Image (cartoon, rainbow, N blue to C red):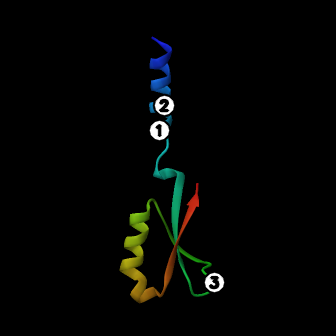
Amino acid sequence: MSYKSIIFIMLLTAFGCSSTKDYRYEVHLIDGGGTHHLITAGDEYEAEDFVDEYEDSHGTMKILKLKN
């Protein structure tokens, strides 16, 4: 194998290892200073769906994007 092939494989591996799992998305109620943690979502879309579904009954919420 040439060194170019090895570098190419290493680049594919590096890009393949980074994913949305580098972050978690926590949904918090804004009342009380945003300290009331409701859920941790695996991705931003799941967090947004939760907010859309429950904001009327729970109150205003915010989504925090945090590094794992």
Upstream in the sequence, badge 1 or badge 3?
1
* CA distance for labels 1 and 3: 37 Å
Classify residue 23 as left or right of residue 43: right
Element on which disc 1 rests:
helix
Q: Which residue is mark 3?
A: 33
- 10 Å neighbourhood of mark 3: few (<14), some, or many (≥20)? few
Residue drawn at x 63%, y 84% is 33
Nearer-the-camera pick, 3 or 37: 3
Do tag 3 and tag 2 residues touch (Cβ < 8 Å)? no
Residue 54, position as x, y percentages in the image: 40, 81
Q: Which mark is residue 11?
A: 2
Residue 43 % position (x, y): 44, 60
Q: Which residue is mark 1?
A: 15
Nearest the eye: 9 or 54? 9
Q: From the image, which quarter does the C terminus lie in?
A: bottom right
Residue displayed at 36% across by 79% down: 53
Amino acid beneath label 3? Gly
Q: Nearer the viewer, mark 3 or mark 2?
A: 2
